[in-house]
């Protein structure tokens, strides 16, 4: 079967190279069907003459070519990726994408078109890059009710937090290093403000709830407020701060979805995930819990997941009712403040003795934290577990104490 690649930047080039360089491996995976790249749709020309020979700029060549069965979308963004993917699905072509924004924002429409035209629509590379989390949730855990997940879904922010924990770097210096190493985007907002993780969390939450959950339904906080002081305080109780994307089915049928920094005990295996690596814990009714770990970005890792999806499309063509979710419904998401949690709180009080007494009065089993050389007026503590709304209200009411940072503790 012939494939076309739309957008040949880092990921597209990785896909092209795997298909070109390992044809026997693909042949075996696709049950003897040869897989070859026929077109590369890109407005930019390539230095590599072999790639340039395949380059086209007119989508119609792909749409009207019956030899092309699978189209890889690795353009990124929504425009024109969404329209191009819809046209491919409407023409009966299977579509494989690595584009998390596209899936998170337009999954409903893309599934509908795929279903109508009996085409496959796959997006294994959209979450955790090369780590096969999506196929594991759809297929590998098919005998489970998936009840929730918790994941380190953004490598850049995990790199920054790792440097803050391991090398006592400041948040700003660690970000600068991430940019220097080419991990963070030039504009790192999506990475450090949690928006990238929120798109991935929305996709995972859609799989768990069986209904489309949009990124704007995911309560999202990034890592910009995390300071060296916070890192130091929690390390005193053998814990670490990680940016987690979480989803948890609720008894009433809603789902809790949240991207935020979280204080995690060192005995939780996800706390040992360091640097740019990603990891996802999935909770299932029969399996208990599993954790998948590996490279969440990069040319070869991401292309590995894309090509695996291409092989699936060649081997089992057509729409797969096991690899999709239903349209969104209203009130699918639990208001995040209704979810029970503990909070780590750091702040300042001029009259520390009075503030400690007030904190003890408002919170049960409060645990005060210490760090070396803390200023006289600094206080940090961990609250009891209650709906977040109640904890925040109690914090507001604390007389003579001003919170500087609040992080959920799990
Ligand atoms: N910027 C993303 C990250 C790339 O740092 O994880 C992969 O989606």
Image: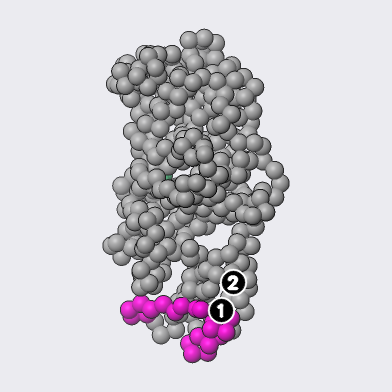
| Res 189 visible | no
Whole-percent x and y of residue 302?
39, 35
What range is drawn magenta here? 352-374
The answer to whether residue 369 is above or below residue 319 is: below
The answer to whether residue 115 is above or below residue 180 is: above
Whole-percent x and y of residue 318?
55, 20
Residue identifier under label 1: 363
Q: Residue furthest right?
A: 330
The residue that appears at 59% across and 54% down in the rendered structure is 256
Does the stretch in magenta take in 347?
Answer: no
Q: Which mark is residue 299?
A: none
The residue that appears at 59% across and 51% down in the rendered structure is 249
Closest to the observer, 256 or 344 = 256
The residue that appears at 48% across and 87% down in the rendered structure is 352
Q: Mark 1: which secondary structure?
A: loop
Closest to the observer, 178 or 256 = 256
Ligand 1 picture quarter? top left
Picture quarter with the N terminus: top left
Mark 2, other Cα within 10 Å: few <14 / some 14–19 / many ≥20: many
Residue identifier under label 2: 391
The response on whether ligand 1 sits within 8 Å of label 1 is no
Whole-percent x and y of residue 129?
41, 39
Q: Do tag 2 and tag 1 residues touch (Cβ < 8 Å)?
A: yes
């Amino acid at each position: 079967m012939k494939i076309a690649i739309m957008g040949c930047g880092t990921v597209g080039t990785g896909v092209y190279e795997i298909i070109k360089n390992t044809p026997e491996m693909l042949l075996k995976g696709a049950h003897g069907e040869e897989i070859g790249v026929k077109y590369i749709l890109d407005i930019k020309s390539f230095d590599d003459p072999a790639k340039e020979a395949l380059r086209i700029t007119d989508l119609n060549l792909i749409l009207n070519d019956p030899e092309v069965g699978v189209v890889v979308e690795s353009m990124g963004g929504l425009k024109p990726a969404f329209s191009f993917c819809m046209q491919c699905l409407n023409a009966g072509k299977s579509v494989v994408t690595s584009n998390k924004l596209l899936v998170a924002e337009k999954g409903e429409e893309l599934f509908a078109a795929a279903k109508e035209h009996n085409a496959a629509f796959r997006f294994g590379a959209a979450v955790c890059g090369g780590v096969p989390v999506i196929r594991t949730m759809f297929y590998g855990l098919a005998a489970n009710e998936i009840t929730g997940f918790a994941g380190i879904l953004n490598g850049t922010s995990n790199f920054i937090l790792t440097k803050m924990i391991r090398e006592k770097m400041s948040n700003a210096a660690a970000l600068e290093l991430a940019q220097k190493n080419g991990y963070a985007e030039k504009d790192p907002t999506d990475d450090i403000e949690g928006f990238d993780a929120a798109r991935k969390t929305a996709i995972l939450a859609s799989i768990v709830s069986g209904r489309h959950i949009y990124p704007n339904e995911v309560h999202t906080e990034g890592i910009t407020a995390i300071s060296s002081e916070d890192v130091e305080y929690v390390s005193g109780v053998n814990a670490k701060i990680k940016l987690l994307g979480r989803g948890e089915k609720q008894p009433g049928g809603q789902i809790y979805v949240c991207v935020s920094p979280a204080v995690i005990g060192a005995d939780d295996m996800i706390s040992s995930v360091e640097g740019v690596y990603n990891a996802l814990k999935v909770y299932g009714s029969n399996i208990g819990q599993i954790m998948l770990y590996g490279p969440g970005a990069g040319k070869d890792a991401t292309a590995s997941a894309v090509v695996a999806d291409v092989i699936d499309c060649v081997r089992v063509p057509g729409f797969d009712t096991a690899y999709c979710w239903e349209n969104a419904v209203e009130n699918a998401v639990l208001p995040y403040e209704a979810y029970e949690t503990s909070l780590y709180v750091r702040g300042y009080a001029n009259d520390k003795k009075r503030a400690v007494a007030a904190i003890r009065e408002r919170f049960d089993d409060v645990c005060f934290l210490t760090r070396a050389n803390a200023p006289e007026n600094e206080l940090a503590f961990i609250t009891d577990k209650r709906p977040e709304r109640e904890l925040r209200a109690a914090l507001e009411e604390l007389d003579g104490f001003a919170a500087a940072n609040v992080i959920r503790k799990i």
